Amino acid sequence: MERIYNGMPAKHLGTEGWAKPWSGGNGGSCVEVMRLRDGRVALRQSTDPDGPALICTHHEIRRFIQGVKSGEADFLLV
């Protein structure tokens, strides 16, 4: 496998293993995630599966989820 980096084409990470944990009634437009072998997490836009992937460390994704749960991202909904 090639080097994994932020912004790489998501299709280079393969087609197996992507999940839609936040899918809802939004017509199929959602964020998909994949846990990588080294513990990092890849995110991609479901409507653009060949587009760029955002690669987060385990710490970054844990902190993001904790922040969302505690309301730190609520300003994005206003």
Image (tube, grey):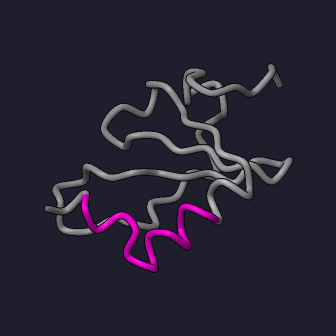
Find out whether residue 69 is within the magenta segment: yes
Task: Report the residue at 18% width, 67% height from top.
Answer: 25
Q: Which quarter of the figure is the N terminus placed in?
A: top right
Residue 13 sits above or below residue 39 on the image = above
Tell me residue 46's x, y (percent): 37, 43
Residue 33 sits above or below residue 12 on the image = below
Quadrant in the picture for residue 35: bottom right
Tell me residue 27's x, y (percent): 16, 55
Q: Start and end of the magenta stretch?
A: 63-75
Tell me residue 49's x, y (percent): 43, 33
Task: Report the residue at 83% width, 48% height from top.
Answer: 37
Task: Report the residue at 50% width, 69% height from top.
Answer: 67
Tell me residue 9's x, y (percent): 55, 22
Q: Nearer the viewer, residue 16 or 74?
A: 74
Q: Nearer the viewer, residue 5 or 28?
A: 5
Quadrant in the picture for residue 70: bottom left
Q: Nearer the viewer, residue 73 or 36?
A: 73
Q: Which quarter of the figure is the C terminus placed in?
A: bottom left
Find out whether residue 8 is within the magenta segment: no
